[in-house]
Amino acid sequence: MIYLDHAATTPVRPSVIERMAAVLAQPTANPAATHRPGRQAAALIDQAATEVAGLIGANAGDIVWTSGATEAINLALKGVLEFQDGGHVVSVVSEHRATLDTLSWLQRHGATVTRLDVDTQGHIDLAALATAMTDDTRCVSVMHVNNETGVLQDIAAIGALCAERGVALHVDAAQSLGKQVIDVDAMQIDLLSMSAHKLGGPAGAGALYVRSRPRVGLAAQIHGGGQQHNRRSGTLAVHQIVGFGAACARAGQRMGDEQQRLRQLWQRLWQGLTTLDGVVRNSPDNGAAHILNISVAGVHGAALLMGLTAGEPALAVSSGAACSAARAESSYVLRAMGREPALAAASVRFSLGADTTITDVDAAAQRTIAEVTRLRALAPRQEQAVLA
């Protein structure tokens, strides 16, 4: 199996496992307790907060621990709207389902939502964003790196526009954390959702950065013991949080060299695939280095994915976001970019990571070409006409 699905989840790095194992090997108290073991556990969490905050240019006290980016997104969007008794939210049609489904929930509970369109590359129009904002707009929510195509939004420009209007900016950084430079002050980001398992940390750990100066009002969505200054109740999983911190520390040390290496692999993979007739690249040249999304004419999307994942060598790839695959639907992101439904359905996302090698990308290109050739030979003649 050649694993090329790092955008879905990354293997936990050995150094992260070591840090987590050291915590699990020792008796760990509840970090909310005031006795010595409790204070020791709290100190581990404080260290992790410093490591996570250091990766985004934030203060450690502005980190709220969650179970992942999905919970962080829910807390950000629902929290801001509830704190301000409703209002208007602006977002994008190509956002992750965690955002889109939360926006739909907010609409059913009285909020007004505007979803901006994207161009053929997946970018939003800043003029359209400016026009969409009203006196009632409470929050703008934009994904930094799209999880299907790797397109990068201009967060600094969006942040400047939001700051000028006095509107909170929420950024989904699940795919950009540890891969793109993030500076919450320079980019004027007010809320940032993060996930550990996208950069070599454990699944089940995430965080929400919440700006404290000026303070962003946030209504808690999980109630109970009042932990984390009443922003998110619940006993903290010390080992998970320590693993998240370790993953961020590692990513910060290696980010520049690693992204250069991944960009070279991305280009090599794409060059290998260009020999295939009817292939369309859905990822831009200047997008995230770890995501390459293609569509292939003249094949059935489900058959292509099954052939790639079950063949020899088997490729661990996806047809887009894992959540879309679970719903058995073609990519709404690609449809929003203007791709024909057949091409949107016949897409493959290759996502690279720390363990990806030149041998992996060369084998993936050869395997994809062979599988497409095999499927086209089996296809009816009318489907072959698509390539003419």
Image (cartoon, rainbow, N blue to C red):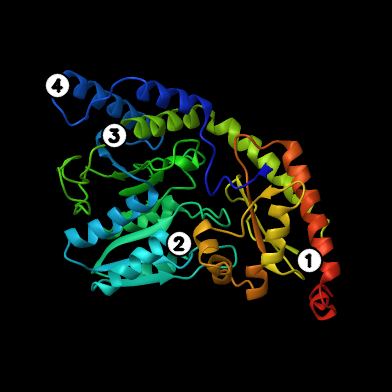
Three-letter residue code for mark 3: Asn
The percent position of residue 188, horizontal first and vertical second, equals 34, 48
- Amino acid type at image mark 4: His
Q: Position of residue 15 (x, y in %)?
A: 49, 24
Pointer 3 residue: 59
Earlier sequence position, callout 2 versus callout 1: 2
What distance separates the C-alpha of mark 2 from that of mark 4? 44 Å
For marks 1 and 4 on the same chain, the one whose residue lies earlier in the sequence? 4
| Sooner in the amino-acid sequence: mark 3 or mark 1 | 3
Question: Which numbered disc, 4 or 3, marks the residue that appears first in the sequence?
Answer: 4
At a point 36% along the width and 29% down the height, the residue shown is 242
Q: CA distance from mark 2 to mark 1?
A: 27 Å
Mark 3 vs mark 2, CA separation in Å? 27 Å
Q: Which residue is mark 4?
A: 35
Q: Looking at the image, is 275 positioned above or below residue 341?
A: above
Residue at position x 68%, y 53% in the image: 309
